[in-house]
Amino acid sequence: MDVLPTANEPNDVEFHAGQQKRQLALQAAAAFVVVSLAWPYYAMRGEDLPWPHAAFAIAAVALLLASLSHQRWWWRLIHAAFAPLAWSVSQLSIDLSFPRNFVCQG
């Protein structure tokens, strides 16, 4: 017999939407911490921020925050891999008109 959720229990869609926002906020907080600490140092020296190192630092901070907030193990892996993978994909020089050309091949 199926049990219907009561008014106080969130349904799966609301729960997952809230969970995704929480994970995105954790990743943004990690990026904010790293950039806030690193940017003044490199700005005073007149150098560019080394983005490969910054991406791995963001991953380390995100992993730390995910561990401190008792995230599941697979969320910790996602947080540890997200920033370095995002930086790696940004280096691929993908043509931004690709999706439009793919859909509108006429």
Image (cartoon, rainbow, N blue to C red):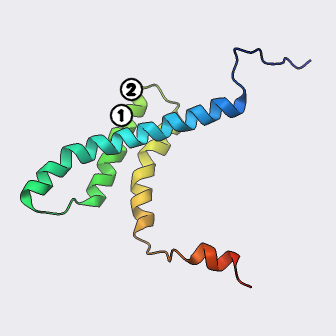
> In what quadrant of the picture does the N terminus appear?
top right
Find the residue positioned furthest to the left: 45
> In what quadrant of the picture does the C terminus appear?
bottom right
**Residue at x 88%, y 20% (from the top left corner):** 2
Is 18 on the left or on the right of 43, as rendered?
right
What residue would you read off at disc 2? 68
User: Residue 28 has which mark?
Assistant: none
Q: How far apart are marks 1 and 2 (CA)?
A: 6 Å
What residue would you read off at disc 1? 64
Q: In this view, does 7 lie above or below 38?
A: above
**Residue at x 38%, y 32% (from the top left corner):** 65
**Residue at x 42%, y 37% (from the top left corner):** 26
Asked if disc 1 and disc 2 are in contact, CB closer than 8 Å, the reply is: yes
Q: What secondary structure is found at the residue carrying circle 1?
A: helix
**Residue at x 39%, y 38% (from the top left corner):** 63
Q: Where is residue 13 in the image (x, y as percent from the top left)?
A: 70, 34
Is 86 on the left or on the right of 4, as rendered?
left
Q: In this view, does 18 lie above or below 91?
A: above
Crowdedness of circle 1 by 10 Å Cα count: few (<14), some, many (20+)? Answer: some
Find the residue positioned furthest to the bottom: 106
Is 52 on the left or on the right of 4, as rendered?
left
Q: Where is residue 35 in the image (x, y as percent from the top left)?
A: 26, 48
Q: Is residue 21 above or below residue 59?
A: above
Q: Where is residue 3 in the image (x, y as percent from the top left)?
A: 85, 17
Q: Quadrant of residue 45?
A: bottom left
Q: What residue type is labelled 2?
A: Leu
Count of labels in the image: 2
Which of 79/16 is in front?
A: 16
